[in-house]
């Protein structure tokens, strides 16, 4: 496992704080406002062609903040598989990614009490407008 630099640790922690604040802002919206905003969201997952969950769609909408409305979103590796690359310097949208229940480890052989609970991590997705066709490098064939 690679060791993060102090700057990377600070950036990671700042990003987590911003994301938590965004989630809190979304949670504090009245239900009718969330419904109104969500009904107009066209976000589609690159991997499946299905819509994002209401929570993730709202998180994406909040983060777009007046920029062009995202439409088709996927992770960095998903875009590469589609023959596209995320342009250098682009910042993605943070979303919740389900990772399943916690598994026992050598240090903690007992399962948590609610071992069927789904857990989430923060993931990043990019809109198709933030990508470009991947250029083939003829020197590496």
Image: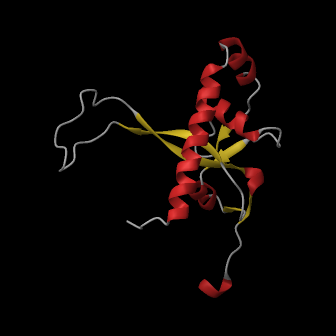
How many numbered marks are there? 0
What color scheme is it?
secondary structure
The answer to whether one can see residue 9 in this image is yes
Q: What residue appears at the point 71 percent right and 34 percent down from the top-left corner?
A: 62
Question: Measured along the vertical axis of the image, is residue 87 above or below residue 107?
Answer: below
The one nearer the camera, 95 or 18, is 18
Find residue 113 and report its image quarter: top left
The answer to whether one can see residue 53 in this image is no
Question: Measured along the vertical axis of the image, is residue 48 above or below residue 27?
Answer: below
The one nearer the camera, 57 or 134, is 57
Find residue 2 and report its image quarter: bottom left
Q: What residue appears at the point 72 percent right and 57 percent down from the top-left corner?
A: 90
Q: Position of residue 29 (x, y in %)?
A: 67, 19
Quadrant of the image for the C terminus?
bottom right
Quadrant of the image for the N terminus?
bottom left
Find residue 136 and report its image quarter: bottom right
In the visual, does 57 lie left or right of 3?
right
The one nearer the camera, 52 or 4, is 4
Q: Position of residue 39 (x, y in %)?
A: 73, 21
Q: What residue appears at the point 70 percent right and 67 percent down from the top-left corner?
A: 134
The one nearer the camera, 121 or 138, is 121
Residue at the far bottom in the pictured view: 139
Q: Position of residue 124 (x, y in %)?
A: 59, 48
Q: Position of residue 31 (x, y in %)?
A: 65, 13
């Amino acid at each position: 496992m690679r060791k993060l630099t102090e700057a990377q640790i600070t950036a990671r922690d700042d990003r987590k704080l911003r994301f938590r604040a965004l989630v809190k802002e979304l949670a504090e919206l009245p239900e009718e406002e969330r419904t109104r905003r969500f009904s107009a969201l066209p976000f589609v997952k690159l991997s499946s062609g299905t819509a994002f969950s209401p929570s993730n769609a709202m998180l994406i909408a909040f983060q777009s903040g007046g920029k062009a409305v995202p439409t088709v979103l996927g992770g960095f590796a998903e875009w590469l598989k589609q023959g596209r690359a995320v342009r250098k310097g682009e910042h993605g949208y943070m979303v919740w990614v389900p990772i399943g229940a916690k598994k026992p480890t050598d240090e903690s052989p007992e399962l948590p009490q609610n071992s069927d609970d789904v857990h989430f991590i923060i993931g990043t997705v990019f809109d198709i407008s933030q990508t470009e066709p991947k250029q083939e490098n003829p020197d590496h064939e």
